[in-house]
Amino acid sequence: TLFPYTTLFRSRIINSKDRPVLDKNRNFISYDEEHIGLGIESIFTILNRNDGTVYYEEDSENFTLSFMLDTVPNNSEKE
């Protein structure tokens, strides 16, 4: 059986941390007023524009961000 070629780009980013990254409502905590999550904000903007999905979590040692993005635009809306 042949499987169809996937057009999804998936990635997982894992960073170590020494203090909490998420509050109890899963909102990001910023400790640096000059650099308030610019990388995270950029990833979310790209995913929102392109119907991507994101999942993030933290444990006592790491913050993990996983995302998926379809690399082929959906042309059905243009027809």
Image (cartoon, helix red, strand yellow):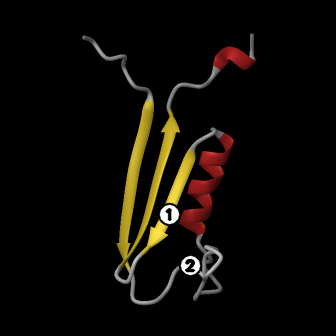
Rendered residue at 53%/25% (across/down)? 72
Instruction: Answer left or right for 4 relative to 34.
Output: left
Seen from the viewer's position, the closer of residues 28 and 3 is: 3
Rendered residue at 68%/15% (across/down)? 76
Q: On residue 2, which mark appears?
A: none
The answer to whether 29 is drawn above or below residue 67 in the figure is below
Q: Earlier in the sequence, mark 2 or mark 1?
A: 2
Seen from the viewer's position, the closer of residues 14 and 46 is: 14
Residue 49's image quarter? top right
Estimate how packed mark 2 is, as few (under 14), some (14 to 19) or many (20 or more) residues with alpha carbons within 10 Å: some
On the rendered image, what quadrant is the C terminus found in?
top right
Amino acid marked by disc 2: Leu
Q: Mark 2 — residue?
A: 22
Helix, strand or loop at mark 2: loop
Residue 45: percent from left, percent from top: 65, 52
Q: Are marks 2 and 1 in contact (CB under 8 Å)?
A: yes
On the rendered image, what quadrant is the N terminus found in?
top left
The answer to whether 48 is drawn above or below residue 31 in the figure is above
The answer to whether 29 is drawn above or below residue 13 in the figure is below
Q: Mark 1 — residue?
A: 56
Rendered residue at 34%/81% (across/down)? 61
Estimate how packed mark 1 is, as few (under 14), some (14 to 19) or many (20 or more) residues with alpha carbons within 10 Å: some
Helix, strand or loop at mark 1: strand
Seen from the viewer's position, the closer of residues 18 and 56 is: 56
Amino acid marked by disc 1: Tyr
Residue 37: percent from left, percent from top: 59, 72
Residue 7: percent from left, percent from top: 44, 27
